[in-house]
Amino acid sequence: MYPIYLQIVGINPLQIGILMSLFYVANLVIGPTGSIILERFSIRKASLLTSFFIIVSSIGLALTTDSKIIAFLRLLSGLGYGIGTVFLTAYQSLIVPERVRGGSFAWISVCYVSPQLFFVPIASYFIKSGLYKAYLLMFLAFSILFFLVSL
């Protein structure tokens, strides 16, 4: 949905492709170093750091259409997501008993993807209805929810 929004606000397709890829580049780069962050801090502090990155990037993305600022914010959100992926995997390994880990991880994966069943139709409705700020604020709402769970 985000590329559609970026096109609506006047960003050209080449820039959109670059902006979208920056999230994944940051996620890829932080993945190996995310374990260092986790080991130096703790799961809770890594969770709060993730929350900080995704809240700041969500607020910024809701307030700007400048492609340079969006590029920075996409990198920041990719870093946060990458750190979050590492610490959530570590946390799951710690709390789920080994004898049920396979099945539990399968259900965790299902639960991880299932919010998209609700998010995508709502996001699509907001975009089609011209409710762009509502669409962008959905990311902030999820970021705040993640922060509250981190506490």
Image (spheres, grey):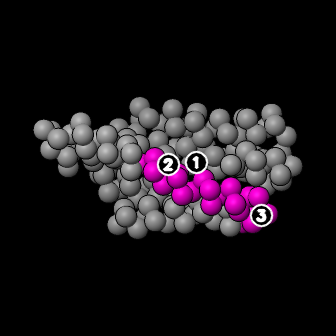
Mark number for residue 129?
3
Q: Residue at x 35, y 66 (%)?
A: 151
- Secondary structure beneath dot 3 equals loop
**Relative height, residue 87 to residue 139 (above, below):** above
- Find residue 25 and report its horizontal and vertical position in percent: 58, 33
Q: Which residue range is magenta in the image? A: 112-133
Mark number for residue 80?
2
- Secondary structure beneath dot 1 equals helix
Query: What is the spatial separation of the Cα atoms under label 2 and label 1, in whole angstroms?
Result: 6 Å
Would you call the spot at circle 1 few (<14 residues within 10 Å), some (14-19), or many (20 or more)? many
- Find residue 66 and report its horizontal and vertical position in percent: 79, 52
Residue under label 1, please give it.
76
Residue 74 visible in the current orientation: yes
The residue closer to the viewer here, 112 or 67, is 112
Residue type at tag 3: Ser
- Find residue 50 and report its horizontal and vertical position in percent: 45, 53
Left or right: where does residue 57 sit relative to residue 82?
A: right
**Relative height, residue 46 to residue 23 (above, below):** below
Task: Say whether marks 2 and 1 touch (CB < 8 Å).
Answer: yes
Query: What is the spatial separation of the Cα atoms under label 3 and label 2, in whole angstroms?
Result: 30 Å
Q: Main secondary structure of the magenta part?
A: helix
Q: Residue at x 52, y 51 (%)?
A: 116
Q: Quadrant of residue 106?
A: top left
Task: Say whether marks 1 and 3 touch (CB < 8 Å).
Answer: no
Residue type at tag 2: Gly
